[in-house]
């Protein structure tokens, strides 16, 4: 008899955030590659499998993604059983920088209307704003929390020093602390491990990584000598974003893919499952954003939830995917620390 698919387990988001599903539904495709009917089917599948965290942003299809989720939520009688996350920063607010008080308040109100919600469970600032003091942004977010219009806050796409500035300012002035950070993170991009991840761990901020499959590279569908074509992200636009074909088509990428394929073959699973299971094992990762064009792609990735990699599998994948340390200051600090360690031991 066929077995039922494993339900998505729940995890706490950071130290003070809500309990969320270990896989989240990313909805950047809604209203773009995915029409409303298919988006609603994806939402249904996700919830049926035990998913609770639905992630969107006001900039996704100029607000259409939020509207699609809002209409779906209204049709099912509400979303009190779910955690709805959205973001603001990049939709223009004439006369105001992206994370200014005026922009944040206006963007939050607009998102509430599109999502048909009384309150947003998790409200992210979508990126750092050089033109706005972070104190101003945090005070605006604090007022939204006080008014009951948002429940928790998070940030996306920041450096380590920026995250520390956010957390230190919030702590010093009794303003809302971020419970979540949304960075790019995968076997193909581990840059956050230098500064951002240690800062998040130190401040007990949970991670909800985006692009866990490296824009499709970690499904194994792209090769070194054939430029992609057809109905895939890079087939339609080989220069697309961080996963652009010429940018990612490197020996490092293909070494990671070879190692992932070997693990996948031993376990009888798709390469994508191996990549997602590795990411789920990383410190601080609370919920992985799964983006898909249709329900079949979504279900295929949700099926990774029951794959537990062995210590040897994890060690191989971590070693092969390591980007190494820049000589300075990271290599210098590491090597000097070793010298001082042995010096203290008298050797």
Image: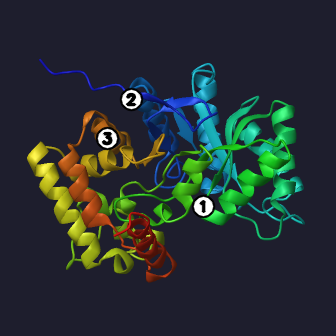
The residue at the point 59 percent across, 40 percent down is: 68
Closer to us: 66 or 49? 49
Label 1: which residue?
Answer: 157
Q: Position of residue 131 (x, y in %)?
A: 82, 70
**Quadrant position of residue 288:** top left
> Circle 3 — which element?
helix
Image quarter where the N terminus lies is top left
The residue at the point 49 percent across, 65 percent down is: 194
The answer to whether residue 147 is above or below residue 3 is below
Label 2 to label 1, Cα distance in Å? 26 Å
The residue at the point 25 percent across, 38 percent down is: 308
> Circle 1 — which element?
loop
Q: Position of residue 119 (x, y in %)?
A: 74, 31
Q: Residues within 10 Å of mark 2 (few under 14, many from 20)?
A: many
Does residue 85 appear anywhere in the picture?
Answer: yes
Circle 1 or circle 3, nearest the eye: 1
Closer to us: 262 or 304? 262
Colouring scheme applied when the structure was drawn: rainbow
Q: Are marks 2 and 1 in contact (CB under 8 Å)?
A: no
Q: Where is residue 82 in the image (x, y as percent from the top left)?
A: 57, 27
First along the sequence among labels 1 and 3: 1
Image quarter where the C terminus lies is bottom left
Q: Position of residue 223 (x, y in %)?
A: 21, 71
Label 1 to label 3, Cα distance in Å? 29 Å
Indicate which disc residue 296 carries.
3
**Position of 243 compared to 124: left or right?**
left
Label 2: which residue?
Answer: 8
């Amino acid at each position: 008899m066929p077995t039922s698919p494993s339900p998505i387990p729940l995890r706490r988001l950071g130290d003070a955030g809500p309990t969320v599903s270990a896989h989240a539904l990313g909805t950047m495709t809604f209203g773009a590659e995915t029409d409303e009917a298919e988006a609603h089917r994806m939402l249904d599948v996700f919830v049926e499998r035990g998913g609770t965290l639905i992630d969107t942003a006001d900039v996704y299809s100029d607000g259409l993604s939020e509207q699609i989720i809002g209409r779906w939520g209204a049709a099912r009688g509400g979303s009190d059983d779910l955690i709805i996350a959205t973001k603001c920063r990049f939709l223009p607010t004439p006369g105001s920088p992206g994370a200014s008080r005026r922009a944040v308040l206006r963007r939050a109100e607009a998102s509430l209307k599109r999502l048909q919600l009384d309150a947003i469970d998790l409200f992210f600032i979508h990126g750092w704003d050089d033109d706005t003091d972070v104190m101003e942004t945090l005070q605006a977010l604090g007022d939204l929390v006080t008014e009951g219009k948002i429940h928790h806050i998070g940030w996306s796409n920041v450096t380590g020093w920026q995250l520390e500035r956010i957390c230190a300012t919030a702590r010093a002035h009794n303003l809302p602390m971020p419970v979540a950070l949304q960075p790019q993170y995968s076997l193909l991009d581990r840059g956050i491990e230098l500064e951002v991840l240690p800062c998040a761990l130190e401040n007990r901020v949970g991670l909800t990584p985006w692009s866990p499959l490296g824009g499709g590279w970690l499904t194994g569908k792209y090769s070194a000598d054939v430029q992609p074509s057809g109905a895939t992200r890079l087939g339609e636009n080989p220069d697309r974003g961080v996963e652009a074909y010429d940018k990612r088509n490197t020996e490092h990428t293909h070494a990671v893919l070879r190692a992932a394929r070997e693990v996948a073959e031993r376990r009888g699973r798709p390469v994508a499952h191996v990549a997602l299971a590795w990411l789920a094992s990383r410190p601080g990762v609370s919920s992985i954003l799964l983006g898909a064009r249709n329900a079949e792609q979504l279900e295929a990735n949700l099926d990774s939830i029951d794959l537990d990699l062995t210590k040897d599998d994890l060690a191989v994948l971590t070693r092969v995917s390591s980007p190494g340390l820049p000589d300075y200051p990271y290599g210098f600090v590491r090597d000097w620390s070793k010298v001082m360690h042995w010096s203290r031991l008298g050797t």
